[in-house]
Image (cartoon, rainbow, N blue to C red):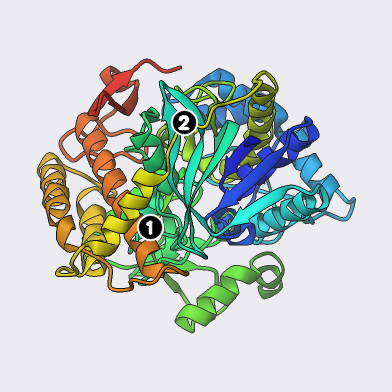
Amino acid sequence: MVDLLIIGSGGAGLCAALSAKENGCDVLVVSKTYPTHSQTVQAQGGINAVLYENDDDINLHIEDTYKASCRLSNKDNIKTLCENAKDSVLWLESIGVPFNKDENSKIKQRKFGGTNKKRTCYSSDYTGLKIIHTLFDQCIKNKIDFKNEYFLIDLIVENKKCYGAIFLDIKTGKIENIYSKSTILATGGYAGVYSNNTTNSLSNCADGTAAALRAGVKLSNIEFVQFHPTALENSNILISESARGEGAYLVDSKNKRFIDELKSRDEVTKAIYEKLINKDKVYLDLRHLDENKINKLLPQEKRIAFEYTNIDITKELLPINPAAHYSMGGIKTDKNFKTNIENLYACGEVAQSSIHGANRLGGNSLIEIITFGKKAGISASNNSKNMKSIKNIESITSFENKIENIYNLPNKINFYEKKDLLANELFEKVGIIKNENDLDDFINFIDNLNSQLPNMGILDKSKIYNKNLIDFLEFLNQIEISKIIALCSKQRKESRGSHNRLEFKNISNEYEKYSYALIEDELLKIGFEEIS
């Protein structure tokens, strides 16, 4: 038994671990991969904070964030985030994150879409990578324990109280219960379920979100998936907003700019998508930028473009398309990062902490995982201090049987082909623009897919490092959360931020509420509740 179990080793999980450890708590971080493989690494552009109030104001940061959310957020939570942002950035600098500096040694900032000020601090276009490596170094220095290559199967929950989680040790194939006084889910978002049309890494498969749903945790605003405007055509590799922040243009096939590149992401994405569905093409144009500037501030974008498309962005146009990028919905948490299940907390992209609403500002995700990750670690560790002991409530037998049943399924249908089909159907029918008929078609598609599962076994029957088994378990989670996205999208009969319904083109006051999805008494409930 541990005081605090943290599931997920991205920026939010590592910050929670560091603050909990500092608060005198024994911490164990369990992860499907390794900290340096986390999704945080792919956050390239920067992290938002008002550092110098002679040219910016925390109230402006609050207003920009609230406006971008399309009034679907909690201003008090945003205020907490923005007021603590400067301390978070300075803390990162103090532990070694190498932010770009000006000639006066002040942290440099760039302007991102949907804001009125240069507020995004950066480390070239490797900001997330630099942050995660620094945090991991600190965790090692502070002797925080890790278990890597552990796949989350389910949470241990009884009578709406969490007592830890059940994992598959990928290395050995054995099932292991880990009991804890408090548990934090920091497993990342669910945009990876759009697997052929996402900037997310292959391992980002909604595992935490799906396990939470099965355990009776309330999910919120799941229909709000952010599509990043600029991913490489065909491969969907992210081209950071830092490119537009440094002055890149968006142009169509006639070489004409068609939108202000620094509008909010929902607006830019929709404008690009409308070009593409009308058989036009869209390019990122950096040719007018100084090559030295590109080499210094956008080295990763230059390298990615050349390595994956053989395009030199200093001389050629770069073809792009939007791709699923970020989950603005997730596990509903209160101001102390608690879920509706006792002893269970959530932070980072897996959580819906009432910040991003219908549309997230670039740079606000990194500041959220740092600021709220640290605070979640304090809340959860304080909860652990108030608990004397816990009982071991869950037998692992049923979960061993669950895995064994997968080994015994016949392999009459190739689930990898179905996974590709699911991702494509999801993007086409539950993507940037949705309509009632497509959503109904997709829900029927999922129901049909579920009926075929008994014939989709795995070919590899080995126990050690069975990637075939992990892929199948991820596929099950993908099915589960994809259907929730579709069901919540169908219920929200309006267009707001990233959620666009063809039949309901405007924001409706009737839907100025959070949606929720919750399993109670084995029944899935979908509805709306007041903003909190």
Q: Quadrant of residue 304?
A: bottom right
Residue 145 relative to residue 113: left or right: right
Tag 2: amino acid: Ile
Query: Is residue 295 something that shows in the picture?
Result: yes
Tag 1: Cα neighbours inside 10 Å, few (<14), some, or many (≥20)? many
Q: Position of residue 150 (x, y in %)?
A: 52, 55
Q: Secondary structure at mark 2?
A: loop
Left or right: where 377 falls relative to 188: right
Residue 271 seen in the current view: no
Are the residues tagged 1 and 2 within 8 Å (C-beta)?
no
| Residue 323 circle label | 1
In this view, 18 is above or below 316: above
Seen from the viewer's position, the closer of residues 98 and 183 is: 183
Q: Which residue corresponds to the image point at 36% horizontal and 32% vertical from the top-left?
A: 221
What element does badge 1 sit on? strand
Horizontal and vertical percent for residue 389?
A: 63, 24
Amino acid of disc 1: Ala
Q: Quadrant of the N terminus?
A: top right
Position of residue 396 measured from the top left corner of the image (x, y, whole percent): 42, 44
**84 sits left or right of 272 in the view:** right
Residue in the image at 47% along x and 44% along y: 166
Residue that carries the numbered disc 2 in the rendered image = 393
Circle nearer the N terminus (1, 2): 1
In the image shown, does 440 or 69 lie closer to the viewer?
440
Residue at far bottom of view:
310
Question: Nearer the viewer's eye, disc 1 or disc 2?
Answer: 2
Tell me residue 23's x, y (percent): 78, 30
Q: CA distance from mark 1 to mark 2?
A: 42 Å
Q: Residues within 10 Å of mark 2 (few under 14, many from 20)?
A: few
Residue 9 shows which numbered tag?
none
Judge whether 392 appears above or below 324 on screen.
Answer: above
Please state the total of marks drawn on the protein image: 2
